[in-house]
């Protein structure tokens, strides 16, 4: 099974920046799609940013121009650089990876990392 672990969350003031990391581990796996999602209290989980097949990048309208998703293939790691943070960005951020392992598709989620933006 492909394990996914997020890190980099924390408390930051409005206008500040954070970089989240998502590290994948396991054997004989490939990553086809990776995404960062978030869930604020009382709200549904939403896609923040995603990369499909290493080419197509999507962002939620609310984060365009402020957040950047990137990947390091050598490290099996995906990042989310978050700039100009706002209080409404406060949420638990989850990493999701999809691909194949031993020719079997997988869909793995991390446990999440808390991001809190104070006003």
Image (cartoon, rainbow, N blue to C red):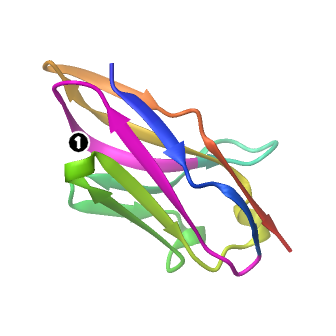
Residue 107 lies, in percent from the top left, at 37, 28
Q: Which residue is mark 1?
A: 32
Q: Is residue 53 visible?
A: no
Q: Examine the rendered structure and indicate whether residue 15 appears above or below residue 1.
A: below
Q: Is residue 2 visible?
A: yes
Q: Examine the rendered structure and indicate whether residue 85 appears above or below residue 113.
A: below
Determine crowd level at label 1: few under 14, some 14-19, many 20+ residues with C-alpha closer than 10 A.
Answer: some
Horizontal placement of 53 versus 86: left or right? left
Q: Residue at x 70, y 63 (%)?
A: 89
Horizontal placement of 111 versus 95: left or right? right
Horizontal placement of 2 versus 65: left or right? left
Residue 98 lies, in percent from the top left, at 32, 35
Q: Residue at x 42, y 58 (%)?
A: 79
Q: In this orientation, which residue lies closer to the viewer: 75 or 53?
A: 75
Q: Which quadrant holds residue 27?
A: top left
Query: SS class of the residue under badge 1?
Result: strand
Q: Quadrant of the C terminus?
A: bottom right
Q: Examine the rendered structure and indicate whether residue 3 appears above or below residue 15.
A: above
Q: Residue at x 32, y 55 (%)?
A: 51
Q: In this orientation, which residue lies closer to the viewer: 94 or 3?
A: 3
Horizontal placement of 17 versus 1: left or right? right
Magenta part, dominant SS: strand
Residue 112 lies, in percent from the top left, at 60, 40
Q: Quadrant of the N terminus?
A: top left
55 in the magenta segment = no
16 in the magenta segment = yes
Total tally of numbered discs in the picture = 1
Q: Examine the rendered structure and indicate whether residue 51 appears above or below residue 118.
A: above
Q: Which residues are magenta?
A: 14-37
Q: Which quadrant holds residue 115?
A: bottom right
């Amino acid at each position: 099974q492909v394990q996914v672990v997020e890190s980099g969350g924390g408390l930051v003031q409005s206008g500040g920046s954070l970089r989240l990391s998502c590290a994948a581990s396991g054997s004989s796996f490939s990553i086809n799609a990776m995404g960062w999602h978030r869930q604020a209290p009382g709200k549904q989980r939403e896609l923040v940013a995603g990369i499909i097949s290493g080419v197509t990048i999507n962002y939620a309208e609310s984060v365009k121009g402020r957040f950047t998703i990137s990947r390091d293939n050598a490290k099996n790691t995906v990042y989310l650089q978050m700039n100009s943070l706002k209080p409404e960005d406060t949420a638990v951020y989850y990493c999701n990876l999809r691909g194949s392992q031993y020719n079997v598709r997988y869909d793995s989620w991390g446990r999440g990392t808390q991001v809190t933006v104070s006003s």
